[in-house]
Image (cartoon, rainbow, N blue to C red):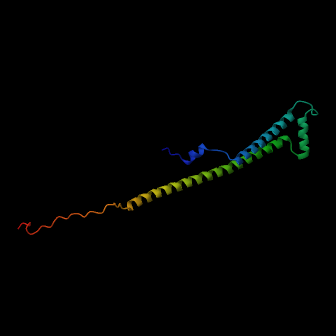
Amino acid sequence: MEITTVKEKNAKKAKMSKWEIFWTVIESIMGFAGLFLLVLGIIGDNLQILSSDNWILQANLSSKSSTGLTYREWGAILIVAAALLAALTLNHFAKKTDMDEERENRRAQRLQILSASAEADRKAEQERTVEVSSEPAKEEEKPAEPTQEDKPE
């Protein structure tokens, strides 16, 4: 009989919940968008063409005039936000997984204790039961008491 622990069982079925997948995708998209904007801002600043032909630089300057932030700054903000969100969600789902694992361990211990006490109860019940045969009890033959004739003098 092979004995497996709860951790081994969980390792075999380690799956991500739908919400965990959802948040991981959101964080990845935010990080990718931030990286894209950061690289786009660097390319726009360093592109060796006329400013009037540089559409990246023009979009970067219009973004700065409307929001006050350039592509580089937006990219850095998105990357930091994605990293913070990833840390929060990983922490949340790790705690949830630990709580589920502890709950499974406690349940396994309770079942183990219950089965051990049930086994002890069965053994005690077997010891308490007395076997009763269906045949009537036979009277034991007593040896005859010696008479005076049989006694030596």
Considering every residue shown, the one lying at the far bottom of the view is 148
Q: Position of residue 8 (x, y in %)?
A: 56, 45
Residue sitting at x 78%, y 40%: 32
Q: Position of residue 80 (x, y in %)?
A: 77, 45
Q: Is residue 131 above or below residue 23?
A: below
**Residue 64 location, quadrant:** top right
Considering every residue shown, the one lying at the far front of the view is 135
Question: Is 51 situated left or right of 75 in this image?
Answer: right
Q: Position of residue 143 (x, y in %)?
A: 17, 64
Q: 72 or 111: which is nearer to us?
A: 111
Q: 86 or 115: which is nearer to us?
A: 115
Residue sitting at x 65%, y 49%: 94
Considering every residue shown, the one lying at the far left of the view is 153
Question: Is 16 situated left or right of 138 in this image?
Answer: right
Quarter of the rendering occupied by the C terminus: bottom left
**Residue 36 location, quadrant:** top right
Q: Position of residue 149 (x, y in %)?
A: 7, 67
Question: Is 44 situated left or right of 90 in this image?
Answer: right
Q: 41 or 5: which is nearer to us?
A: 5
Q: Is residue 16 above or below residue 139?
A: above
Considering every residue shown, the one lying at the far right of the view is 52
Q: 39 or 113: which is nearer to us?
A: 113
Residue sitting at x 44%, y 59%: 121
**Residue 59 location, quadrant:** top right
Residue sitting at x 26%, y 62%: 138
> How many numbered marks does the figure carry?
0
